[in-house]
Image (cartoon, rainbow, N blue to C red):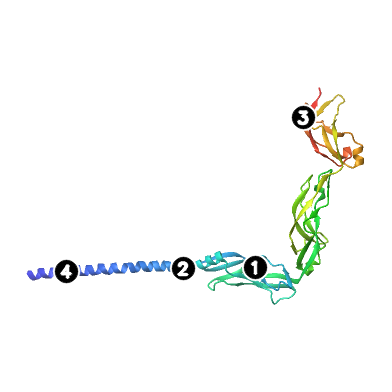
Amino acid sequence: MKKFLLNNWAYRLLALVFAILLFLYVGSSQPSTTSSVKNNSNSTSLTSNRSTTISSQLSLTVNSNKYFVTGYPEKVQLHITGPSALVTTTANTQNFKVYADLSKLGVGTHRVRIQQEGLNNDLRYRFEPATIKVDIQPRKTVTYPLQVKYNKENIASGYQPGNASADVKNVKITGASDQINRIKTVVAQLNVPQNAKSSINSQAIVEALDSKQNTVNVVITPATADVTLPITPGNSKELPIKLEPKGITDDNESFTLTSATKRVRVFGTQAQLKKLDSIKVEVDTSDVRTTKTKDVELDSKLNNVKGFDPDRISVKINRNN
């Protein structure tokens, strides 16, 4: 009996030892599993790929002292794919060069391949467009006199423009020889507002034009000019207005016409102004039943003059019963 009890305690002690050993084994292996998961996560994060598109400035490798190139785009689209961190860094810094090599090409039209310099070797890339068409011509530089151009129809009736002048007399033009040969005139395009009555001092864009008034593709220095255009009243004198009803259909109809404007300035030639002692203003009364106020335009043809200031007046119409 005593031997049997001793054997039971031995089994219990042995089971306890195994339990402790098993617990220690499981505890020591758990951190290793966690570390492995973390390492795998970091590895995945570092090696994941992404793509992006960068709008890149295109440069040309060419003898710019000898040749002038046209037809190429200012920018091209660069599509890159690679490790996420590397793609992000490349897009942010853009520490690479996109170019077309024309150094071995001569005069004429050519199709050339877009190239790059400085992209990391771990990146895959493609250009859009992959090739471009360029026109290479001998470079030419000339000097042209500058003229001022503007729309004379925008100057108010009765006012006259003086001699327009620019702060530069001549401009330098550089471009392909075939384009330079097309130039007929070089003008500063002055914007004159509608119904202008006062002198204008403004900056104007300089353009080279061909015989059909089309813009020629060249580089102009300077590209703008400060232009002054004097605008002054022509021959004029101040005259009273004479209001007359128009559109009466019944001999018994009569109207009283009044206006706060009593006199206007009249523009015309000396001969035209000499004949006038008042300005006739016809007011349409055909739609007036009792009282109405109308904005009436002064008619230069009716009075045989060039214009008025003001050229519209407000007239109150009362129908007499």
Name the residue that disc number 1 marks: 58
Amino acid carrying label 2: it is Leu
Q: Residue at x 25, y 67 (%)?
A: 23
State the SS at label 2: helix
Q: Which quarter of the rendering shows the N terminus?
A: bottom left
Give the left or right position of residue 21, taking residue 117 as reference: left
Amino acid carrying label 3: it is Lys
Q: Of 70 and 199, which appears nearest the observer?
A: 199
Sequence-wise first label, 4 or 2: 4
C-alpha span from label 1 to label 4? 83 Å
Bin the neighbour count of mark 2 within 10 Å (Cα to Cα): few under 14, some 14-19, many 20 and up: few
Name the residue that disc number 4 marks: 13
Amino acid carrying label 4: it is Leu
C-alpha span from label 2 to label 1? 32 Å
Q: Are the residues flagged by discs 3 and 2 in contact, CB closer than 8 Å?
A: no
Say above or below: 147 vs 126: above
Q: Residue at x 77, y 49 (%)?
A: 200
Bin the neighbour count of mark 3 within 10 Å (Cα to Cα): few under 14, some 14-19, many 20 and up: few
Name the residue that disc number 2 marks: 46
Q: Are the residues flagged by discs 3 and 1 in contact, CB closer than 8 Å?
A: no
Whether residue 42 can be seen here: yes
Q: Residue 231: give its label.
A: none
C-alpha span from label 3 to label 1? 68 Å
Sequence-wise first label, 3 or 4: 4
Query: How many numbered dots are placed on residues in this image?
Result: 4
Discs 2/1, front: 1
Discs 1/4, front: 1
